[in-house]
Image (cartoon, rainbow, N blue to C red):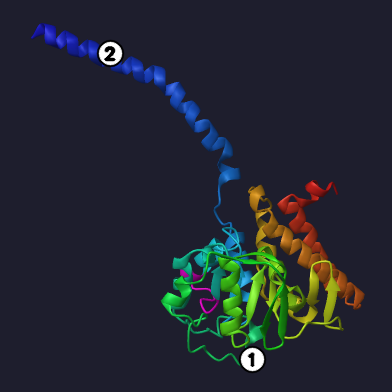
Amino acid sequence: MATLATSSSSGTRISRMGWILSAPILLLAFVPFFANHRAASRAGQTFTRDWAADLLNSVEPYGILITEGDNDTFPLWYAQEVEGIRKDVVVACSCLLETDWNVRDMIRRPIYPYDAAAGPAIYRNGVWPKPSGPPLHLTMAQADAIPGYMELQQPRVFEKDSIVATIKPGIISRGQLAVLQFIKDSFPARPIYFSSRATPDGLGLSSHILTQGLAQKLVMRSPVPSGDTVNTPIGLLDLPRTRALWTTVYRGPAALIREGQWVDRASVGIPYHYVLVGYYLASLLQHEGDQAEAARVLIQVQEMARAAGLDRQTGS
């Protein structure tokens, strides 16, 4: 019994000694937590959510928004499925359209009603009939029959009403074929838009694209420069719609300025696109003589560039 007691006491001392020796190491492990807590915390940061809402709200009711990858797709899904923002918009990721299951999902997707009271005021005077069917008029068998790719040996012309697009020789992917099917089946009954990352250059549609804020709208007739449609380095820009979106709808600029930093360099293209659109909007407003509004937009753009670290990248 005495031997057992001695052994137990010795084990307790060893255990206590181990704790004493390991305590400083454990404390060191907490140093990064406390040192980086302020920089790593995302409390109150809403920019990604606000950007997703801004992009969705750039699309007219019951529109189809073609995206390109993770950065311009997943935040939109969160906004729609978690916060219920603009569920009437069909988000179609061109990368995922390369798969048969995602094309089937587009056919099965419910038609969500547009909530005019919750949507942007700029759409409230329009007439937006609810679609009666899916955005792709295909059976499941027809969807599965879309080839993985198509090789064009010579230029191919794609026509839909007034849209005439010449597709250059080369490889057209399954995702691109699905995009053409969206246009064939749903346009113009459903507005079709592209995110900035999904510009459809490879489909010969560039002459039918009009920039409206953060999104690029497919239009029936090739737009020509006019008082409201202005040629810019980011394409023909719909000045009245872009101005209305920026000044009355978009919440992303204020959110980024409030947060004051952009830590994910891989996705810096998101704030960069805001900066581009805002800069050209401010320039056009200044040219029209609206100096006060131009100055307000330009200040926002400069503050966004600083928050995203874009001023340091350009050396300004």
Residue placed most toward the observer, 132 or 262: 132
Residue farthest to the left, as pictured: 1
Q: Amino acid at mark 2?
A: Arg
- Please state which of the two labelled residues, at mark 2 or mark 1, is closer to the viewer: 1
Magenta segment range?
Answer: 80-89
Crowd band around label 1 with a 10 angstrom C-alpha radius: few (<14), some (14–19), many (20+): few
Q: Which mark is residue 13?
A: 2
Q: Quadrant of the N terminus?
A: top left
Residue at image position (68%, 83%) is 159
Decide if residue 99 is on the left or right side of residue 150: left
Q: Is residue 296 visible?
A: no
Residue at image position (70%, 59%) is 271
Q: Where is mark 1, residue-wise? A: 126
Up/down of 314 relative to 237, above or below: above
Q: Amino acid at mark 1?
A: Gly
Residue 144, image quadrant: bottom left
Residue 87 within the segment the image draws in magenta: yes
In this rendering, the count of numbered labels is 2
